[in-house]
């Protein structure tokens, strides 16, 4: 019996698929993995990558040699569709300084995912919060200095027994 070792990208341990012959087709490997993992072919597809060379197998009739190790990822049936638009934060000199609302433009030609499009907005929010926090720290430090100065001026001499 021949075998191919596989593991999902999120797992640590390899599992084994056994078969007869010197190689197995990608289509047959996917069927056996889905059967072992109790996955439905109507729910998802599998992306198979060689663990050593990082080569992705795309042709369903390609032959995978025995004793190979592969990494498996679940993918949606239709594939991942890129987002239609993203937002870009304008950090030029014409942007309003101190504004909590970043100036945004729509980029219709971008192929970034929706999570990537949140990144510039997130960075703008972090920058704004850093500015607020810095101002609050300066205010607290000056307040502490005032309180300490008042306490020292009003304090009575320490009595030693």
Image (spheres, grey):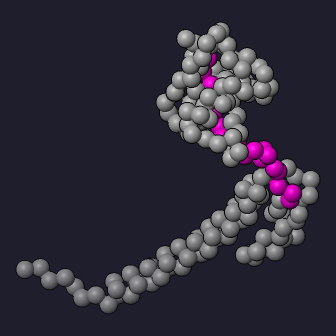
Q: Residue at x 28, y 87 (%)?
A: 155
Query: Is residue 4 visible to us here?
Result: yes
Would residue 17 appear left or right of 31 to someone viewing this image? left
Query: Is residue 71 visible to us here?
Result: no
| Among the 4 quarters of the image, the one containing residue 131 | bottom right
Q: Residue furthest top?
A: 22
Q: Residue at x 79, y 46 (%)?
A: 78
- By secondary structure, the bulk of the magenta-drawn segment is best described as loop
Q: Nearer the viewer, residue 99 or 36?
A: 36
| Among the 4 quarters of the image, the one containing residue 5 | top right
Q: Residue at x 85, y 49 (%)?
A: 111
Asked if the magenta segment contains residue 74, the reply would be yes
Q: Quadrant of the C terminus?
A: bottom left
Q: Residue furthest left?
A: 161
Q: Residue at x 77, y 20 (%)?
A: 62
Image position of 147 with respect to 105: above or below:
below
The image position of residue 151, as x and y in percent, is: 34, 86
Image position of 105 with respect to 143: above or below:
above
Image position of 84 with respect to 153: above or below:
above
User: What span is colored magenta in the figure?
Assistant: 68-85
The image position of residue 43, as x and y in percent, is: 68, 47
Would residue 134 appear left or right of 77 to someone viewing this image? left
The image position of residue 107, as x and y in percent, is: 89, 59
């Amino acid at each position: 019996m021949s075998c191919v070792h596989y593991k999902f990208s999120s797992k640590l341990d390899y599992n084994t698929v056994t078969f007869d012959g010197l190689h197995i087709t990608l289509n047959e490997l996917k069927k056996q993995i889905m059967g072992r993992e109790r996955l439905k072919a109507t729910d998802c597809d599998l992306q198979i990558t060689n663990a050593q060379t990082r080569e992705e197998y795309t042709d369903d009739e390609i032959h995978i040699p025995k004793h190979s190790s592969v990494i498996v990822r679940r993918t949606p049936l239709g594939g991942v569709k890129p987002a239609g638009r993203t937002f870009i934060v304008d950090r030029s000199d014409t942007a309003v300084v101190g504004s909590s609302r970043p100036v945004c433009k729509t980029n219709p030609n971008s192929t970034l995912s929706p999570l990537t499009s949140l990144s510039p907005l997130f960075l703008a929010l972090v920058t704004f919060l850093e500015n607020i926090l810095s101002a609050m720290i300066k205010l607290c430090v000056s307040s502490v200095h005032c309180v300490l100065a008042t306490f020292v001026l009003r304090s009575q001499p320490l009595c030693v027994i």
